[in-house]
Image (cartoon, rainbow, N blue to C red):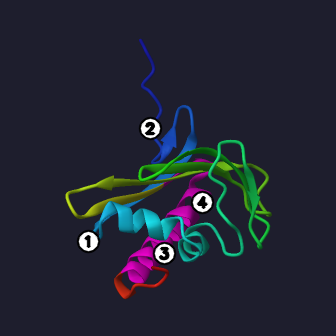
Amino acid sequence: MTAAPPPSTVGLTRDAGFEIGVSRTIDHSSSAVWEYLTSQDGIRRWLGGGLELPAAAGDRYTTPDGTTGEVRSFHPLDRIRLTWQPVDWDHPSTVQVAIVDRGGRTMLRFHQERLADPDERARQRTHWAGVMDGVIADLATGSGS
């Protein structure tokens, strides 16, 4: 008799640990969303202020609050993938910011993987939902454009 597989744990993947994704389709063109995300105001919103986003794979960054990481890939008008490790974490995670054109609207997605456990996953879900709300508010008011 074969044992039943263990119950699945929400957000746990075989290869990337715990992960979270937050996405919304917003009423702005993909070029406008990309321009904002890569502007100083946009970078401040989703990554942290006081830095210029490196655009080459292998480039490292450190935010003013001590979060460190390395750009893994940067594809204009498509996605940015980087490692992300806050100063109080003992492990890096991977964050991907992606956009998809939806005919004048844009699907924006923040995805984070390699999270340590369900609690960290829940905290990051709240974090990225707040970032998403901020991005949408900024685009609606023209902040950073």
Left or right: where does residue 83 sit relative to residue 137? right
Left or right: where does residue 49 sit relative to residue 105? right
Rate crowding at label 1 as few (under 14), some (14 to 19) or many (20 or more) other CA atoms within 10 Å: some
Magenta residues, start to end: 111-139
Q: Which residue is mark 2?
A: 7
Q: Position of residue 82 (x, y in %)?
A: 62, 49
Q: Earlier in the sequence, mark 3 or mark 1?
A: 1
Rate crowding at label 4 as few (under 14), some (14 to 19) or many (20 or more) other CA atoms within 10 Å: few
Q: CA distance from mark 2 to mark 4?
A: 18 Å
Say which of 110 and 1 sits in front.
110
Rate crowding at label 3 as few (under 14), some (14 to 19) or many (20 or more) other CA atoms within 10 Å: some
Q: Amino acid at mark 3?
A: Gly
Q: CA distance from mark 3 to mark 4?
A: 17 Å
Q: Earlier in the sequence, mark 2 or mark 1?
A: 2
Query: Which residue is painted at 72% across and 48% down in the image?
Result: 59
Q: Main secondary structure of the magenta part?
A: helix
Q: Position of residue 116 (x, y in %)?
A: 65, 49
Q: Are marks 2 and 4 in contact (CB under 8 Å)?
A: no
Q: CA distance from mark 4 to mark 1?
A: 32 Å
Question: In this view, which residue lies farthest toward the bottom?
Answer: 141
Q: Amino acid at mark 1?
A: Asp
Q: Earlier in the sequence, mark 3 or mark 4?
A: 4
In the structure shown, which secondary structural element does the residue marked by tag 2 occupy?
Answer: loop
Q: Earlier in the sequence, mark 2 or mark 3?
A: 2
Magenta-span inclusion, residue 124: yes
Q: Which residue is mark 1?
A: 27
Which of the labelled discs sits on residue 119, or is there none? 4
